[in-house]
Image (spheres, rainbow, N blue to C red):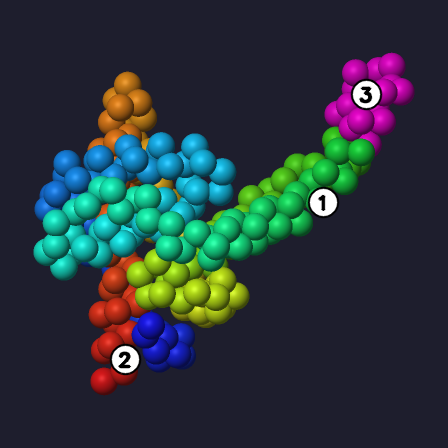
Amino acid sequence: MGNFDLITNKRYNFNIGKYISEGIDLFKKDIGGFVLATFLAVIMSIIPFCGILAMGNFYKICKKADEGRPVQAGDIFDFTDFWVYFKFFVLLLVVVFVLMIPVQITLIPLFAAAQYGDDPSDIGTALFAGGLGIWFCLFILLMFAFSVSFYFVQPLISIYRIQSVRQAYSLSWKIAKKNFWMILIFMILAGIISEIGIFACGIGIFLTAPLGLCIKYMSFKDVLETQNQKVGL
């Protein structure tokens, strides 16, 4: 486990173009292995709570490939970090549930209008009175904020062996907030790259999804390892 107190206390560069380029190079090292690992990750995701674990294992595979070791797609089924990711999954559920409470409350006037109102315009009035649009926009903004705060949690757990979800999240937020907007933009771009394969009859996602994860892995490596070491010099 590295000493990440260094990178949490100083600013660092977050080079989106570099991560995309290096991620593509990493993907090219073993395209077949990454594609197979993605297919196995989809299968593993059928098991409750295990989708997030499979993604963490994928980053372990990325590290192996980056170090010149052969990709072992079967590593997707590594359950070493199961309980850590189970707790992380529960944390994510709690966060989403809490954020959804205001949205659910704003629906109360809508249900009342649907139950007792005779005029269709009552529904629109109820939506306006409940402030659904405002709360929904706020929910989206908060989800973006939490997504950025969670950005480094998985590599900290899977690659750098931090076994406390609280510690991993605390470190992730301290690091991510220093480049909040760049990380948010990068997450959106990586997400688009990952999902673009859907347009190729859906099958193409088995190429673009692992590519997107390889790109994200290179950002983890640069910030948590390369730049952290430079800060410590």
Q: Which quadrant holds the N terminus?
A: bottom left
Where in the figure is residue 74, as x and y percent of width and height?
A: 25, 42
Left or right relative to 213: residue 28: left
The residue tagged 1 is: 102
Left or right relative to 207: residue 136: right
* Residue 199 appears in the picture as rendered: no
- The residue that appears at 28% across and 19% down in the rendered structure is 201
Residue nearer the viewer, 124 or 16: 16
Per the rendered image, the range of residues in magenta is: 109-124
Identity, as a three-letter code, of the amino acid under mark 2: Val
Task: Find residue 71 and name its label.
Answer: none
Within the magenta stretch, is there residue 113?
yes
Identity, as a three-letter code, of the amino acid under mark 1: Pro
Could you classify mark 2 by the number of other residues whose Cα lies within 10 Å: few (under 14), some (14-19), or many (20 or more)?
some
Secondary structure, mark 2, is: helix
Left or right relative to 55: residue 230: left
Q: Is residue 117 above or below residue 5?
A: above
Task: Find residue 114 and name its label.
Answer: 3
Identity, as a three-letter code, of the amino acid under mark 3: Ala
Residue nearer the viewer, 89 or 221: 89
Q: CA distance from mark 3 to mark 1?
A: 19 Å
* Residue 113 appears in the picture as rendered: yes
Q: CA distance from mark 3 to mark 2?
A: 60 Å
Within the magenta stretch, is there residue 37?
no
* Mark toward the start of the polypeptide (3 vs 1): 1
Secondary structure, mark 1, is: helix
- The residue that appears at 43% across and 65% down in the rendered structure is 163
The residue tagged 2 is: 231
* Mark toward the start of the polypeptide (3 vs 2): 3
